[in-house]
Amino acid sequence: MSERIIELAKKLKALADRGVDGEKINAAVKLEALLKKYDLTIEDVEAEIVQAELFEYKFVQKQILIQVIMMVMGMNVKIWGSTQKRNAFIVDCTKSQFIEIQAAFNFYWNAYEEDLRIFNQAFIQKNKLLPRDGGTRSIGEMSDEDKREIRKILNMMDSIDRKQHSKQLENRT
């Protein structure tokens, strides 16, 4: 399939979508004939159309979203802040790139949240931020999944420096 034909179809589609009066109708008729002649579907054409897509995020998700966008689009992608929404980016991409970015972001965000949960547990354990009278379960009572999680926590604890909090209260008498 010639790239020239796809480009022509894109232009006709844009004119059929945004044109006025007769030009809009004429572009739609020509697009339909072009699609039929080359056995294309509108999805074939739309998949290659680059358009501005909005990516919304929570503040803490910003860096991971940027990394995922660059992973899919490359280093030279242009990312604009949205003028309409505070926590959103606008990226010029195809529909397939948009879908790939959303899917990859959801996957990596879920993985990040799981690792963050493990890190929180490791940090609490490393710094002994535990109740003085807290009970513990024996290893024999734990499932294999619990044991794997404990190994992850212990491994992560090895890379965390223990912090020592000093009481700042004076003893006044």
Image (cartoon, helix red, strand yellow):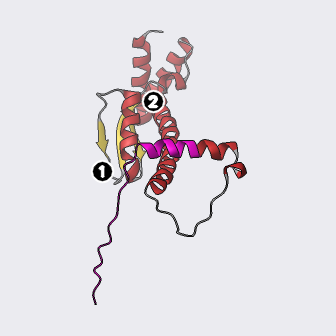
Q: What is the quadrant of the C terminus in the image?
A: bottom left
Q: Secondary structure at mark 1?
A: loop
Find the residue positioned furthest to the bottom. 173
Magenta span dominant secondary structure? loop
In this rendering, is residue 118 above or below 52? below
Residue 152 placement, left or right of 158: right
Numbered mark located on residue 83 in the image? 1
Along the line of sight, the residue nearer the viewer: 1 or 91: 91
Numbered mark located on residue 7 in the image? none
Residue 147 placement, left or right of 9: right
Q: Secondary structure at mark 2?
A: helix
**Residue 157 highlighted magenta (yes or no):** yes
Along the line of sight, the residue nearer the viewer: 5 or 31: 5
Magenta region, residue range = 150-173
* Mark closest to the chain's N terminus, 1 or 2: 1
Residue at horizontal 44%, vertical 27%?
A: 13
In this rendering, is residue 32 above or below 86? above
Is the C-beta separation of discs 1 and 2 under 8 Å? no
Residue at horizontal 44%, vertical 9%?
A: 2
Numbered mark located on residue 97 in the image? 2
Query: Residue 144 placed where, x, y %?
Result: 68, 42
